[in-house]
Amino acid sequence: DPVLSQAAVYAMRIYMGVSVVFGVQIACQQTFIAIGNAKTSLFLAVLRKIILLIPLILAAVAVTGTVKGVDVYEGLSTGALDGLRILVRILPPLVGLMTAVYMLRASGLLDLAARGLAPVLHFLGIPPETIGLLLIRPISGSGALGVGSELIQSYGPDSLIGRTAAVMMGSTETTFYTVAVYFGAAGVRNTRYAIPAALCADLAGFIAASWTTRLFFGP
C-alpha cells in the first residue's frame, strides 16, 4: 500500500528522532528502583505514559484533523472500534507469550543458559550476569524490567553490571512482543526476515551497550 508506506516512513522518522528519550526514562526509572525510591520511579512511568503521552496523542490527532478538515470524532470512534477488534485478535498469543516467559524464569532455565553461554558472552564483551536480561528483553518488557531491577538491586546502580543493564534496557526493543502486536494487527502471518533482522539489531544493541558502558565507566 503506497499510502501506508509513505505514512510509515514519516512516522518512523519521528519515532527514531525521539527514541533517545525512552532510554533516558528507563535508565532513570531503573535507578530510582535500585536505590529504594519506588515512588519516584512510579511517577516517571505515569508521567510518560499517562500524563504526557495520551494527552499529546489526542492533541496531535485533533490538530491534524482540524488542519486537514477531517471529522475527528468519527475517525476516533472508528479507530477505537478497530482497536478493540485488534485487541481481541492479538490477546491470546500475548497471554501465551507472557506465560512462557515467567515459566522460563521460574524453571531456572535462564541460570542454566547463563552458565552455558558465559564463554561466548565474555568473548563479545558482555557481562555474563546480564544473560537473563538478554534472553527476556526481546520477549517481554515487563519481564526485562524485573530482571533489570534485580541486577541493579544486587550489584548496585553505580556498578558496571547495573549501568550495563540500564543502558541495555534503553538500547534494545521487545522484538517478539512488537512483532506479535503489529504483524498480528495487520494480519500478516509470514514475517519473512523481520524477526532475524530485529534480533540482530538487539544483539548489536547489547554489545554496543556493554562496550559503551565499559568505555565511559571503567573496565
Image (tube, rainbow, N blue to C red):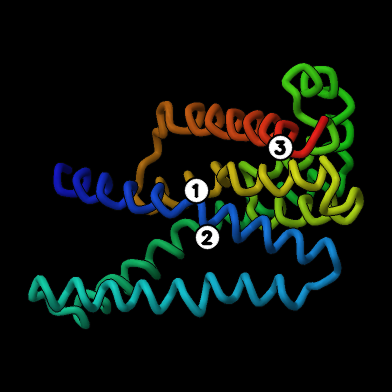
Q: Is residue 209 left or right of residue 63?
A: right
> Which mark is drawn over residue 91?
2
Q: CA distance from mark 3 to mark 2?
A: 41 Å
Dot 2 amino acid type: Leu
Q: Position of residue 4 (x, y in %)?
A: 21, 48
What's the residue at 64%, 50% (across, down)? 140
- For the residue labelled by badge 1, is the local secondary structure a helix, a strand or a loop? helix
Q: Is residue 114 left or right of residue 46?
A: right
Q: Earlier in the sequence, mark 3 or mark 1?
A: 1
Whole-Å distance between the Cαs marked 3 and 1?
31 Å
Comparing labels 1 and 2, the label whose residue is closer to the camera: 1
Does residue 79 lie above or below 90 as drawn? Answer: below
Q: Position of residue 200 (x, y in %)?
A: 55, 27
Q: Earlier in the sequence, mark 3 or mark 2?
A: 2
- Residue located at (14% from left, 78% from top): 66
Badge 3, how many Cα within 10 Å: few under 14, some, many 20+?
Answer: few
Provide the residue designation for mark 3.
Answer: 216
The answer to which of marks 1 and 2 sits earlier in the sequence is 2
Q: Which mark is residue 178?
A: 1
Q: What element does badge 3 sit on?
A: helix
Q: Nearer the viewer, residue 176 or 24?
A: 24
Residue found 50% across the figure and 33% down from its top:
198
Q: Are marks 1 and 2 in contact (CB under 8 Å)?
A: no
Q: Compare residues 88 and 59 and report the one nearer the observer.
A: 59
In the displayed structure, 205 sits above or below 185; it is above
